[in-house]
């Protein structure tokens, strides 16, 4: 595996880790307002309280890795999505502030205000991630100077909005599966109901997005004819989607959550499959203007040095993540130091 492919795979691993881990806490946040009573909403916040900030480290690491390995793609993507990224940062900041501020006063109005901020910002963040993925699949208007030639409203096209709403539903079902694993009693039964509604919406939207993609919305969908093994990943992803529902119907909480994680992993893999070897496909002149893992890369020496850092740092991240989830395993309990 050459260095450029190694870094493409590394970015895929980081994006998968982020989508799985922060996906469920964005989903929990989006479901927050459906919980009844103050104790129910506190339980939802405390289910992700010990892990949400660690989950977002994967996004920061992804951004840093993209900047180090493919600086031209980093610059083009961040300039093209500038306003969208600012909205995303506002949403992520409001999520954090809402969690910390909500419990500082007993006022019902105060807590309701932060409940809305927490839930709305979580839903907006999930939507924006899906919109970004949809635009990457479609391609962006990138000129020969590697500059983004469009406007913000161009990003809000029908296909990208469809993938955005699909991602929102996927994260909601993922978050509900996590809540079913972490809660008990009436709240667990409510989480099961939330899961079925979100899962049904995701399946319908996934089918619609797939039809749109193969109807011409995604130029790279023709890759399946060139690399038919990609259909195996599609089949495995569908199996994971179906098994999530099967496990939930049997009350197998851990199996349902693991299958939901596999669903997200499969979808990220398909995103990478559609893009490779591109990082930022161009709709203006795909052959010349698209930024690939070779045309947008840093020098071979930089890639080699950063690869060594990955070999040293990634095991530590994995060990830390595993340790945190082991320490905070089990059902959520509201205590003195809870949110």
Image (cartoon, grey):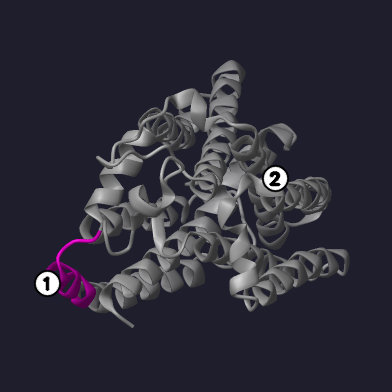
The residue under label 1 is: 301
Residue 142 seen in the current view = yes
Q: Position of residue 92 (x, y in %)?
A: 43, 37
Task: Please tell me whether the stretch drawn in magenta is mainly helix, strand or loop.
Answer: helix
Q: Residue at x 68, y 65 (%)?
A: 257
The residue under label 2 is: 169
- Quadrant of residue 296 within the rendered picture: bottom left
Q: Position of residue 228 (x, y in %)?
A: 65, 76
Number of the front mark, 2 or 1: 1
As drawn, the residue found furthest toward the bottom would be 1
Dot 1: within a 10 Å radius of its alpha carbon, few (fewer than 14), some, or many (20 or more) residues? few
Horizontal relation, residue 234 to residue 70: left or right: right
First reached walking from the N terminus: tag 2 or tag 1: 2
Q: Residue at x 45, y 59 (%)?
A: 15
As drawn, the residue found furthest toward the left would be 301
Q: Position of residue 14 (x, y in %)?
A: 41, 63
Q: Is residue 135 above or below residue 106?
A: below
Horizontal relation, residue 51 to residue 251: left or right: left
Closer to the camera, 198 or 167?
A: 167
Instruction: Check if residue 211 falls in the magenta segment.
Output: no
Can you say which quadrant of the picture contains the N terminus?
Answer: bottom left
- Quadrant of residue 106 within the rendered picture: top right
- Residue 250 tag number: none
């Amino acid at each position: 595996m050459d260095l450029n492919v190694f870094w493409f795979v590394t970015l895929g691993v980081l994006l998968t880790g982020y989508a799985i881990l922060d996906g469920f806490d964005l989903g929990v946040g989006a479901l927050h307002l459906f919980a009844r009573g103050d104790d129910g909403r506190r339980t939802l916040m405390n289910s992700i309280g010990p892990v949400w900030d660690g989950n977002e480290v994967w996004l920061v690491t992804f951004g840093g890795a993209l900047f180090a390995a493919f600086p031209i793609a980093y610059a083009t993507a961040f300039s093209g999505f500038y306003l969208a990224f600012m909205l995303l940062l506002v949403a992520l900041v409001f999520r954090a502030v809402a969690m910390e501020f909500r419990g500082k006063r007993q006022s019902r109005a105060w807590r309701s205000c932060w409940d809305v901020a927490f839930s709305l910002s979580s839903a907006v963040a999930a939507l924006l991630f899906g919109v970004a993925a949809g635009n990457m699949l479609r391609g962006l208007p990138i000129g020969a100077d590697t500059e983004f030639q469009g406007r913000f409203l161009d990003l809000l096209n029908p296909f990208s909005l469809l993938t955005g709403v699909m991602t929102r539903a996927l994260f909601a079902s993922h978050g509900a599966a996590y809540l079913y694993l972490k809660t008990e009693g009436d709240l667990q039964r409510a989480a099961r109901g939330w899961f079925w509604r979100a899962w049904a919406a995701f399946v319908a939207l996934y089918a619609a997005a797939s039809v749109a993609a193969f109807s011409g919305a995604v130029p790279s969908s023709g890759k399946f004819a060139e690399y038919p093994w990609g259909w195996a990943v599609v089949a495995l992803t569908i199996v994971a989607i179906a098994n999530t529902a099967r496990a939930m119907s049997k009350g197998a909480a851990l199996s349902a959550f693991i299958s939901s994680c596999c669903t997200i992993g499969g979808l990220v893999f398909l995103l990478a499959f559609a893009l490779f070897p591109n990082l930022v496909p161009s709709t203006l002149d795909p052959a010349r203007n698209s930024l690939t893992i070779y045309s947008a890369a840093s020098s071979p020496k930089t890639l080699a040095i950063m690869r060594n850092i990955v070999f040293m740092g990634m095991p530590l991240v994995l060990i830390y993540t595993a340790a945190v989830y082991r320490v905070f395993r089990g059902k959520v309990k509201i205590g003195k130091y809870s949110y």
